Image (cartoon, helix red, strand yellow):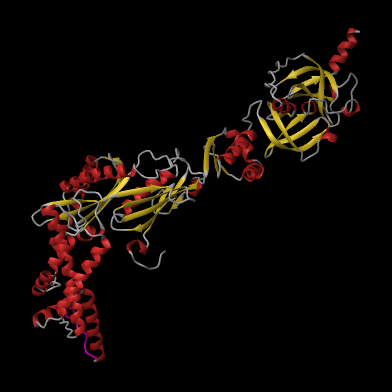
Amino acid sequence: MIEGLGNFLTNDEMLEAVGAGSKAIAETCRALERLQAEVGKAKRQAIPPVGQQLQSLIESVARPHVEAILLASEAKMKMSAQLHAVKQQTLQKLQSTEDPELREQARQAFQNQEKTAQKLREKHRQDLLAAETVLPSEGEEASLPLLDESEEALNEGLSDAVGLVMKAVVSDVLRQNARDDGRRPDGRSLDGVRRITSRASVLPRTHGSSLFTRGETQALSVATWVGSSTSAQREDGMQLDADSAKNFYLQYFFPPSCVGETGRVGGDDFPYTIRVESTITESNGSSSMASVCAGCLAMQDAGVPVSRPVAGVAMGLLLFSDGEHRILTDITGFEDGHGDMDFKTAGDDKGITAFQMDIKVEGITLDILADALDKAQHARRQVLKAMAQCSPPPAATLSPLAPRILKFTIPNDKISAMVGPGGKVIKAIQQSTNCTVQVDSTTSVVEITADSEEKMALARSQIDTVIGNVHPGHIFRDCKVVRVERFGVFAEVAPGKDGLVHQSELDFQNVRDVAESYKEGDLLDVMLLEVQDTGKFALSRKAVLQKDAGQDWSPPPEPEPLTVGEVIKEARIVSITNFGCFVEVRPGKQGLLHNSQLAIEYVNSAWDLFEEGDKVDVKVMELSSKRISLSRKALLMEAQVAA
């Protein structure tokens, strides 16, 4: 047996690998032969299952009918029925014989069956036990004559004999036709491929589907976008990397109905996990290779970016006693059963991606393998050409029913902001967008899984907003007011992220009483004016009204940088604390006016002099990356000196 995978191996590479493996195995075989010569036992001579006279009679009766059937090019079921009828006719003729020699050979054929021999030996053993006789040794028991004179033994022996000889006759006729006439039971030449038809999008509610038919073998395949990497199939094993996962897997179903029977039916560049299901609806050989073809078409129909379409084909072999051989292309189940090899290859017209071989003989030569590989490559080229004519063709675009996956990288220091305390932010994003969001803290890769492009885009937008990856001019729609202050309102632009809409940016007209016009829970459309150094958002409702009215809007110009000693007139007090007040010195930029710098005389509380929203003149006293220190006292003292 040979099996393996490849990255589009050429035939020469395949032969080189098999040759190297064959040389290595030869050493082991020679060692086993030496061991056998030293300690091995002589093999028992097998008893011929059918006597020569009985075999000749069965052949003479059955062979003419078998030859006619294998030349008639009938379908699988009809040919099987005809061969079964020949077997029954031959059996009936033999059962009516009175020849004692034939009857004795029939009984012997029954007894030569291993299972029958075991039953008879066990019966003989039980008889000895019942008679309280000493049991024979293992060697003596094996040599005991096993005779059964019943009519049942005669009929079973004849049935067994006819079955064995019929199989040999069919195999011999198959080989003779292939060797002498280059003809196969279904009328094809040795290298002929069965008629192929294929259809895509055959099932309405799947991500991708196809129906592939080659002769009397048919596969219905469905490709499903299972989801992100978390949906990959986990593998358990003894190897070091046992905890691995497959982002592509195929599930193969071969129900009894496909052969006319009844019974119990039981990477990084590509972030998706794909499941392909192949259900065999009809089978006459090579159903696994039909699954390769149908699966490839189904994946294309689902929009999977298949770089090189592949097909599969099974090759057969007929070996003759004089050393000659014949390779059969695209074998049927009949040829698989009576031939000497089942060699499956998958790939395109240039290379092999997977292969598996079963042989019924002791071995084959590299020349035979080379012949099979060459004919298999030619056959795959034919199959791929037929698949290219699939009607209707694969959709080649992502199914609207398939999940959407987006991967991107964010700065590592932004992961905590995106996740939030206890996962609060990332959970809110998932809940509000109905998406699955995951982040890998080691690679900073974020993965979004959604059932539509719109939801995926919304989740991406919210993540960008939360980590501050937005630019002035971006509009946020339907933002909920989460807090109302005298100087403006705070609107939530994304889960866990809000910004200030200042009183002056609420409307074209000045809003005198913010609390009277707005309340928590109101929905606003706002525009981002600035992302401050602290990460806070300065928002404007007025800018959105202006833009929606068709008026041109552009982000406000970058303010001049502050300098120590600079005097800022009518700066607005944003908030008041126990130790002073915060004053807006540039749009979105605030400085601290400490209690000690409020007036010439010390003031215990800023509330004694000001209210939030008041205007005040201040002087910049100190600048650093962490704070801006302001003073009103310095300006008052300068005015006093000047006076």
Closest to the observer, 193 or 303: 193
Residues 601 and 228: in front is 228
Task: Give the quarter of the image for residue 382.
Answer: top left
Residue 618: percent from the left, percent from the top?
82, 18
Quarter occupied by residue 162: bottom left
Q: Is residue 526 above or below residue 95?
A: above
Q: Is residue 482 above or below residue 590?
A: below
Is residue 540 located in the magenta-colored stretch of the structure?
no
Q: Is residue 135 above or below residue 417?
A: below
Residue 256 position, x and y percent, is 36, 64
Give the mark count: 0
In the image, the segment drawn in magenta is 132-141
Name the residue furthest top: 642
In this rendering, does residue 615 appear at all?
A: yes
> Quadrant of the rendered structure where residue 123 is?
bottom left
Quadrant the N terminus occupies? bottom left
Left or right of 504, for residue 206: left
Identify which residue is drawn at 75% across, 27% down. 542
- Estimate the x, y position of residue 321 in percent, counting from the top left: 9, 57
| Principal secondary structure, stretch drawn in magenta | loop
Quadrant of image for the C terminus = top right
Residue plotted at (80% across, 28% down):
503
User: Residue 63: x percent and y percent?
Assistant: 13, 66
Q: Is residue 41 visible?
A: no
Does residue 261 appear to the left or right of 448 in the view shown?
Answer: left
Which residue occupies the foreground of this view, 534 or 221? 221
